[in-house]
Amino acid sequence: ASYKRIAEVDDKVKAFLTLDEETARNYAKQLDEALPERVEKGLLYGLPIGIKDNIITKGLRTTCASKILGNFEPVHDATAMGKIRSSEAIMIGKLNMDEFAMGSSTENSSFFRTRNPWNLDHVPGGSSGGSAASVAAGEVLFSLGSDTGGSIRQPASYCGVVGLKPTYGRVSRFGLVAFASSLDQIGPITRSVEDNAYLLQVISGYDHMDSTSANVDVPDYLSSLTGDIQGLKVAVPKEYLAEGVNEDVKNKILDALKVLEGLGATWEEVSLPHSKYAVATYYLLASSEASANLARFDGVRYGVRSDNGANLIEMYKESRSAGFGDEVKRRIMLGTFALSSGYYDAYYKKAQQVRTLIKKDFDDVLEKFDVIIGPTAPTTAFKIGEQVDDPLTMYANDILTIPVNLAGVPAISVPCGLSNGLPVGLQIIGKHFDESTVYRVAHAFE
Ligand code: GLN
């Protein structure tokens, strides 16, 4: 059914970079044949899943939507991918994204643009645009994305699906091609909150292969979907409903708060005063980390090598110049500048200090409240081509998601209505490692 749907719609949506049909069909057959004798089944037994193309898959091309990895076939699976396989889900294929997860519209893919299934003239959001569009278009039941500054939640919001960025450290990053290691997290994109909880259950947990993976218990997420939010305390940051947030989006969020009140929750306006520095802080830190992480793509260790260089240094230069797209080059240059001696203290170190203040804003509010609620993005999905030549406007799409990555806390985007025929997303932010409460609220609202 999944491949049939892909054949019907993917020439319009263009969510998939690579399909793995033969392997998937063989695996499905194998599961079917074993069925009569099976006592225990995997948690995701037989369910079709798509994987963002920056999560490595053994023997299957993994490109990060970059020409530099156009021919890269990983020799092992990412930890999250291995867990998906153990759960007996069926991997359908690899999903389009902004190159190396840098972008907010999937227009930075080196291969092609993915379109929003709700309106094909609009972007699906990014960088996990393929992951969100494939679920919204019914091509797969669910998908994995990655979120460094909003890349799961913003496309989920634009495509009217559910997307969760787990707490930093909840899901192993081993085998997720690194963009900004202190911010990156893998997370689930699904049609419902319940599906989301199933998928997080499978991919969560400590992994000795990732030194930042947290050795904390993984609760039973499904048991938190009680529908009961009586007495729940919600904080609504005034910065999240301020100027720059579309009126219609704002009204949908206020409507959602009324629904939550009707379910017995209370809400109060609060302030996250350092939010205004979040975008600048993020682009300094994320670009700095990216400039170091992307140094490994040198034409030798991975992927495509240029034949033009006369010596080693020229070969590096030629391979990287031809292999990376404009946005990736922009980030590498920004990051290299911010880390260079003479500028390090003024930019990188200062940004780290501001990051601490932003995290403290969240800690202070979450000490008194159960969750923080606001929009996921200031607008609905914009038109293809509208922002692609204006990096600063593009960066502003993540103004409401970026602070969450800087603080390391979990957050979900759930659909909360339509504006001019395009979905609006409600963002629910929780305490560190308290995905359960985030799910409980999202599920009650849904
Ligand atoms: N849009 C943001 C960026 O371009 C966030 C991307 C992400 O979360 N991977 O960096």
Image (cartoon, rainbow, N blue to C red):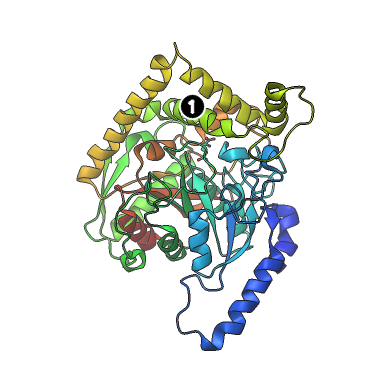
Q: Nearer the viewer, residue 242 or 439?
A: 439
Label 1 residue near ligand 1, CB within 8 Å = no
Residue 317, relative to residue 186: is it above or below? above
The answer to whether any part of residue 29 appears in the image is yes
Kindly identify which residue carries mark 1: 288
| Residue type indicated by callout 1 | Ser
Q: Crowding near pointer 1: few (<14 within 10 Å), some, many (20+)?
A: many
Residue 11 coordinates in the image, percent (x, y): 75, 55
Residue 402, relative to residue 332: is it above or below? below
Measuring 57% from the left and 30% from the top, which residue is drawn there?
295
Q: Disc 1 on helix, strand or loop?
A: helix
Residue 240 coordinates in the image, percent (x, y): 38, 37
Measuring 67% from the left and 29% from the top, which residue is drawn there?
320
The answer to whether any part of residue 1 appears in the image is no
Measuring 73% from the left and 30% from the top, which residue is drawn there?
322
Residue 179 coordinates in the image, percent (x, y): 52, 37
- Quadrant showing the N terminus: bottom right
Q: Nearer the viewer, residue 40 or 11?
A: 40
Measuring 57% from the left and 83% from the top, which residue is drawn there?
34
Where residue 437 sits, quadrant-wise, is bottom left
